[in-house]
Image: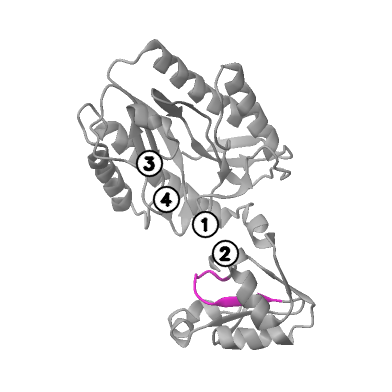
Amino acid sequence: MQYLSGRDAGRILVTGSSAVLWVKDVYSELYGSLYYSASYPLEVRVGGKPEMDRALRGVRSRSVAVSSPALLAPVRKASRKHVVVEEVVKAARSVKTRWEIGFIRRSCNVAKAGMRKAEDVVGLGVRELDAVAEIEGEIRRRGSVKGVFGDGMLLASGRRAADIHAKPSLKRIGRGLVVVDLGANVGGYFSDMTRTLGVGRLTPLEADLMSFVESLRDEAIGRIRPGMLASEVHGFVEGCIKEKGYGFYHLTGHGVGLEVHELPSFSPGSKMRLRAGMVFTVEPGIYIPGKFGVRFEDTVLLKNSGCVKLT
């Protein structure tokens, strides 16, 4: 809804000859300057589900595509047609406009400020949740309307850092590694970045793997060009980590935009080719249960000549 209409309210039906947005009367009045401008691409009508259901039944096509599996049953019942899930809008969203990139850059700048705060507050004896409170407060003060994930940023120290999605706890940070995964949301657009911070004197293994993963992130970013398959990038990163003697337990990266995780997906089986204008993360990591974890992640913009780091 946000991508197609500029607002997250209402219902849209697109056919071969029309594109109609139904909104409640209050939104019609609130956002009339947008909805009824000469350049607005949708026909705006006041209404909701009943009006759209009637329009669905009048569509001549034998099938209807929806954006989410959750819509399959209600739209099938309303339209009495064959209904499928289609990612055509998600695929279009994978390539950002200059306008979108502007918001993502602002979001990345807020995330970077949050990471600088993390470097200041993460230290011996500090509780993980206390550090998160300071970091997220900084991100909000800088203009982020929400956190990067639904239940907040990730921060895990010591053995807990080997859990890829460990939530912050009341544990006090000790000597070792701390994985900090955060982001921001400005103008509806997300950013995402991860750093592994060292607290106290590191062991040779901790220092070695921190350097290896950080360098691998940079090497992977430097190799990416338009036309590559997303799976090629994942294969390179996974291969390097396996050569080092470790397993790789998550995807190499993901698109970033109106959602913090969107297309392209850097998975082993992805057939999506990378295009200039895509914004995505690159995030190699190594995790040793019972010991520690290491991850470095940046949000990057793909141009014709290669990637530019935004975080």
Q: Left or right: where does residue 104 sit relative to residue 154?
A: right
Say which label, 4 or 3, has the lower sequence index. Answer: 4
The answer to whether the residue labelled 4 contacts the one labelled 1, judged by CB atoms less than 8 Å apart, is no
Residue extending farthest left: 125
The answer to whether the residue labelled 4 contacts the one labelled 3, judged by CB atoms less than 8 Å apart, is yes
Quarter of the image with the N terminus in it = bottom right
Which amino acid lies under the numbered mark 3 shown in the image of this protein?
A: Leu
Which amino acid lies under the numbered mark 4 shown in the image of this protein?
A: Phe
Magenta stretch containing residue 287, yes or no? no
Q: Residue drawn at (73%, 76%), measured in percent from left and top?
A: 15
Q: Which residue is nearer to you in this view: 30 or 175?
A: 175
Say which label, 2 or 4, has the lower sequence index. Answer: 2
Reading the image, the residue beneath label 3 is 154
Q: Give neighbour class at mark 4: few <14, some 14-19, many 20+ (Cα, 10 Å).
A: some
Which amino acid lies under the numbered mark 1 shown in the image of this protein?
A: Leu
Task: Please provide percent x and percent y for residue 296.
Answer: 47, 31
Q: CA distance from mark 4 to mark 1?
A: 12 Å
Say which label, 4 or 1, has the lower sequence index. Answer: 4
Q: Give neighbour class at mark 3: few <14, some 14-19, many 20+ (Cα, 10 Å).
A: many
Say which label, 3 or 1, has the lower sequence index. Answer: 3
Q: CA distance from mark 2 to mark 1?
A: 8 Å
Q: Which mark is residue 80?
A: none
Q: CA distance from mark 2 to mark 3?
A: 27 Å
Q: Which mark is residue 258?
A: 1
Q: Which residue is nearer to you in this view: 9 or 42?
A: 9
The answer to whether the residue labelled 2 contacts the one labelled 1, judged by CB atoms less than 8 Å apart, is yes
